[in-house]
Image (tube, rainbow, N blue to C red):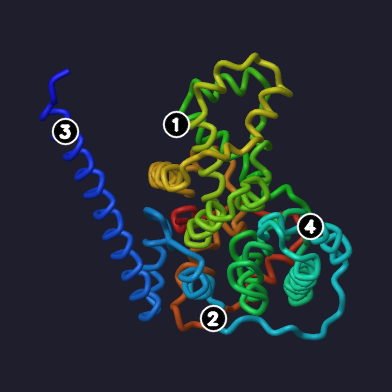
Amino acid sequence: MPFSHTKLLRKRTSGISHSSNETKETAELQRRIHMINNAIARKDIAELRKLAVTGPGLVNDGLRRLAWPLLLRCEKGGEVREADEHSDEAQAKLDVERSFVYLPKGTRTTAKKQYQRDLQEVIACVLRRHLDLHYYQGFHDICSVLLIVLGKQLAIAAAENIAMFLLRDAMLDSLEPILRQLMLLDTILQFEDPQIHKFMTESNILPYFGLSWVITWCSHDIKDVGKVARLFDFFISSNPLMSVYLAARLVISRRQELLMLERDNASIHTFLSKFPQNIDIDDIIAKTQGLYNKYPPAVLQKLSGDPLDETSCVNTYKRHWSSLKSNAPVDYSLADLILSIPQTRKPVRDISEVR
């Protein structure tokens, strides 16, 4: 066979193209890291949020250790203080004993035990500071990720602010408020993909298959801690309802497989409740953000015909949390008041304020 200059040229140019793409990606990543470091140095919360919800987010745990405390208003960390034991600590302890699936293989038993003691302390500190918080199974998953990335002192303060302002609806005296959030997943599907909505309605599928994703920010369901941390970048920088949009986007991303299933309630629920481990996290985040922009919380609640309570963390997010200046102290008084209110609540009145 004669020597082919064309094949050799293709091989060479293909290698050049591949190398060029790698160089471009490396340059873009370095530029992003530079932007993150600049935003951290300036304590520019708005810029950090933009970076956290786009592309590869905050890139690595080293940057997250600096950025998450700014985004969660907990730079000084939390002190371990003596206080009365919370009634839910016994349940939390049982969950803690099953924690730390993300620790590297080969981690010594003594090191694992120390992590578990630290995790128990993080949860106990949060509960003891706000006695009207109600622990739920899954909050320990949230706290374990915070502990691994931030260390104990910062994890205490980060978990406290997440509990009070981002996951408060799951920490009331019943899960009913968070289940109402999940029903908005059904509304998203109704308007975004009527075929899936029809299939699920006819199969008597309620959106409760996504409960674990919403209350643990997928940390209970994803095996790759890097993907979990990337999702945490996204969730701590977004409205508390964002995990519901993500759940809807995940369902839509699997529409072909879903619509091929037999209309059997149990098998469909099992299929939907399994988080797809090979998912491209950056891609699903970008598409989730698109859903959020198309149906923001105020619009979505109107479309549902059943708006969330005015005290829902979804509806108080802008007033109580996202509008805080970077140097402003965190005020827990209104959140504590909401936690103390009996469960007879009111729908939001001025939904135009919700973002």
Mark 4 in CB contact with mark 1 (< 8 angstroms) = no
Q: Is residue 154 above or below residue 194?
A: below
Can you identify the residue that label 4 sits on? Answer: 173
Mark 2 in CB contact with mark 1 (< 8 angstroms) = no
Please give left or right for residue 287 compared with residue 225 in the image. left
Q: Which mark is residue 54?
A: none
Residue sitting nearer the eye, 39 or 323: 39
N-term mark: 3 or 2 = 3
Q: Which mark is residue 8?
A: 3
Work out whether residue 102 can be spotted. Answer: yes
Can you identify the residue that label 2 sits on? Answer: 75
Q: Which mark is residue 192?
A: 1
Q: Residues within 10 Å of mark 2 (few under 14, many from 20)?
A: some
How far is mark 3 from mark 4, CA to CA?
A: 70 Å
Q: Position of residue 71 (x, y in %)?
A: 49, 70
Secondary structure beneath disc 1? helix
- In the orientation shown, which residue stands out farthest toward the left? 5
Q: What amino acid is found at the position of numbered circle 2 in the picture?
A: Glu
N-term mark: 4 or 1 = 4
N-term mark: 2 or 1 = 2
